[in-house]
Amino acid sequence: MTTDIQSRARNLVLGALVADAATMGFHWLYDQDRIREVAPEASEFVGPTPAHFDGVPAFFAHAGRTSGAQSQYGEQALVMARALAANAGNYDRTVYADHFRAHFGYGGKYVGYIDHATRDTLDNFRRAEDEILLRAKAIPFEGDASVTTAMVGKANAVIKQYQSVVLREKFEEAVRMTHDDDIIVAYGFQVLDEILAIGPVYGASDQQLPAIAKLPALIAVQTVSDVDEDTFLQSAVSAVRTTSDHPRSIAYAPVCAKMMQAAINGADMTQVIAEGRAVANEEIDALLATAMSMIDQPNTDATKHFGMACDLRYGVPSVVHNLATSSDYRTAIRANIYAGGDNCGRAMLVGAIAGAVYGVDGTHGIPQEWVDKLEVGNEINALLTNLIG
């Protein structure tokens, strides 16, 4: 039997993905009047059309994608859901990073726009691999070069699975399976220690909305699992740092995580926003206070005030204003689309929280006909059933 918390957790993830897909056709169109002109009543699920972007401030990023597809933001959310499912619902940074790289990197399944954070994150991963190999080759060893490559591969494999004493035991087992030689084992441990000395590899120095795009599935699973508060916040920060290792992105991680958690736990919008502000630093709280002081103004104006581009300092206050001034999912998503700019980036948080609070269908919830338009509808339903029930 599905509990209310499970239902809201499912709707948090579904709401984010539906909002992203609904918004994608007008993503990065910075002329609010143009959006209203093209779609005066229903702005959702308009396919990306170059002519809509002509002659106004805009960037047409999604050529080749069709109505119902995700932007790169929704793709990030899906990668996290897949990584969690592959690890029995448990968050592991290396598992997530591997899935991220496999999806967005060279030879990956994703074909589409690669944003700054993703590009730089992939570059960081690649540079770390090069650094590992250089360090391994610098260790004096008279054996064949293929042994060095083998030791690096084995070390990387066990580091992803084990820690401490167990890690070293498993590494020796792995080495002796193919090289049962004390000299090679000793060399292998030197390689392992060099790799461990490098430490974890994180993402781009980026403070934009891609930082929080992967959070919905993680927050949903950990809230349903009722993990302790430290684990919850550390996981959110770790996931953000995997692609956006910037102090401001790290600061926004708990704010967004706590708002989503509150929505799953049954809070109303006032309580949701209060939960985010309770963990916000001075800079973020001041921006959110300003957003709340503007609730007599439309979200288009509030978004212009903060900034329509991708920075978290612009997007999250716009989202809070939207949530505070909307009374149903459909209204919230349309308001965000009409606000223009990086509306897909904002859609992930707007849609997640509105989805969890308002549910599916009915007067206030995610319209079922919108859910039915998702290209990944079958996959996400299966993933959510696996992860949440």
Image (spheres, rainbow, N blue to C red):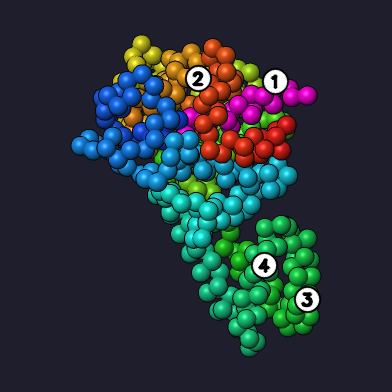
Secondary structure at badge 1 equals helix
Labels 1, 4: front one: 1
Residues under labels 3 and 4: Cα distance? Answer: 13 Å
Marks 3/1 in contact by CB < 8 Å: the verdict is no
Q: Which of the pair 278/253 is nearer the observer?
A: 253
Secondary structure at badge 4 equals helix
The amino acid type found where label 4 is placed reads Ala
Secondary structure at badge 2 equals helix
Residue 155's mark? 4
Residue 329's mark? 2
Which comes sooner in the sequence, label 1 or label 2?
1
Marks 2/4 in contact by CB < 8 Å: the verdict is no
Picture residue at 39% right of the left edge, 31% below the top: 46
Marks 3/4 in contact by CB < 8 Å: the verdict is no
Labels 2, 4: front one: 2
**Residue 344 at x, y percent in the picture:** 42, 34
The amino acid type found where label 3 is placed reads Arg
Picture residue at 59% right of the left edge, 52% below the top: 99
Residue 17 among magenta residues: yes
